[in-house]
Amino acid sequence: MASGSRTVRIRRGLDLDYPGAPRQVIGAAAAVATVALLGSDYPGLRLEPLVAPGDPVKAGQALLRDRQHPDRHIVAPASGMVSALNRGPRRRVESLVLDVAGAATREFALPGTLDRQALVGLLLASGLWAAIASRPFGRAADLDSPPAALFLTAMDSRPHAVDAAMVIAEHQAWFERGARALRLLTPGPCYLCHQAGHNPAPLDDITPVGFAGPHPAGLPGTHIHHLHPVGRGQGLVWQIGYADVIALGHLLETGRIWADRIIALSGPGLADPVLLRVPPGARLQDLVAGRISPPRAILYSGSVLDGRVQDYLARSHLQVFALHHHAPAAPLSPLVRRMQAWMNAGIPALIPNGVHERVAPPGILPIPLLRALSTGDVELARQLGALGLVEEDLALLSHVDGAGTDYGAMLRAMLDELAPRP
């Protein structure tokens, strides 16, 4: 273990075994024709477009910005042409789609001396500000207000996750440069959370902490609970994943955005599970072309536990999971449909069992919290620790519950209700 490192052992949790695990060898770059920026990746923000369909763009060019804070930009992950701008209710931006072409790249002006102010300006201009998540509420951090602590996440315990240590080792210089820069963001402690036994290189004034045990040992929520819990008046903490730490180091080294992410393409619906280099926001069908077995599959952006069925890779996701697509059953009679609708009306009964306790996020009473979320009891959920959680922290509980209830979605609705208005 690195000098000064400690190990936290997680006793409770659950490692799920799914077929189709990827080989932990980084393959070639995937051929991607289309990428997208997704409004769902930026909860709480009102985004406005800076481009229109038909406009040519460079990788790194600002395409969207936060209407409340116009200096916060979201940039193109690749060069090409804007092919669609899709809006949802109240004209909110749902997606901005690019057809990938060429290699034109924006060059960012790098500061001669890197201090906190210069770093914040670069993060805002390059779109990397959105990679820093704040807790409570799980939204993009307000970089003007320093956090009480900063967490660099260098591991992942989800099923079929990429070996973070391997990716970091391949981009070690960029990771270290990005980590040292991020240290400027807070006067409080900075933690590098890694898998126990992976021996991270020592970094000045950054505390390495190893985590061992089953999932959710690799989730930021677990790390925050053990090292600097939030949600009961302890102040804000920020968290950023290892891929975005590498991206910042690359930006500081080259003046250009890092247009690669190493993702796991896995699941029983794939003939050849692999690790691929892909641009952020890649179209999932482009990634699985020629790899699906049988020809149709359900594609998740993210892991099978907390991923979403959608067309494009979400900003924070480093996995694509493919499940077999089964042909629909014969149509049901009108009477059977009415009976099913009646039986499924309302919220399914929550039956406590020992598995809930086993897989609950650390420090959480699962049954009272799930009941508070199910009934919309905001104040009770707050008292039970909801402010220290985000959607991924409840994925195991949704998985073992058996009723098909998405507690993560309920939590997000409650967090958005509790979050301060801009």
Image (cartoon, rainbow, N blue to C red):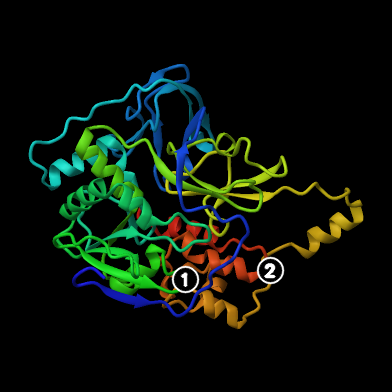
Q: In percent of the image, x 35 and y 23: which residue is there?
A: 58
Quadrant in which residue 402 is drawn? bottom right
Outermost residue toward the bottom?
Answer: 354
Q: CA distance from mark 1 to mark 2?
A: 18 Å
Comparing 109 with 385, the one in front is 109
Residue that badge 2 annotates? 348
- 205 left or right of 125? left
Which amino acid, mark 1?
A: Ala
> Residue 230: where, in percent of width, then height?
32, 69
Q: Identify the mark nearer the N-term, 1 or 2.
A: 2
Q: Residues within 10 Å of mark 1 (few under 14, many from 20)?
A: many
> Residue 37: where, in percent of width, then height?
45, 35
Which amino acid, mark 2?
A: Pro
Q: In percent of the image, x 41 and y 47: which residue is there?
A: 44
Comparing 146 with 48, the one in front is 146
From this view, report whether residue 69 is shown above or below residue 196: above
- 58 left or right of 85? left
Quadrant in which residue 111 is drawn? top left
Comparing 416 with 241, the one in front is 241
- Does residue 267 appear in this view? yes
> Residue 23: where, in percent of width, then height?
51, 52
Residue that badge 1 annotates? 381
- 366 left or right of 294? left
From this view, report whether residue 245 is shown above or below residue 126: below
Label disc, if present, on residue 367 of the rendered structure = none
Q: Residues within 10 Å of mark 2 (few under 14, many from 20)?
A: few
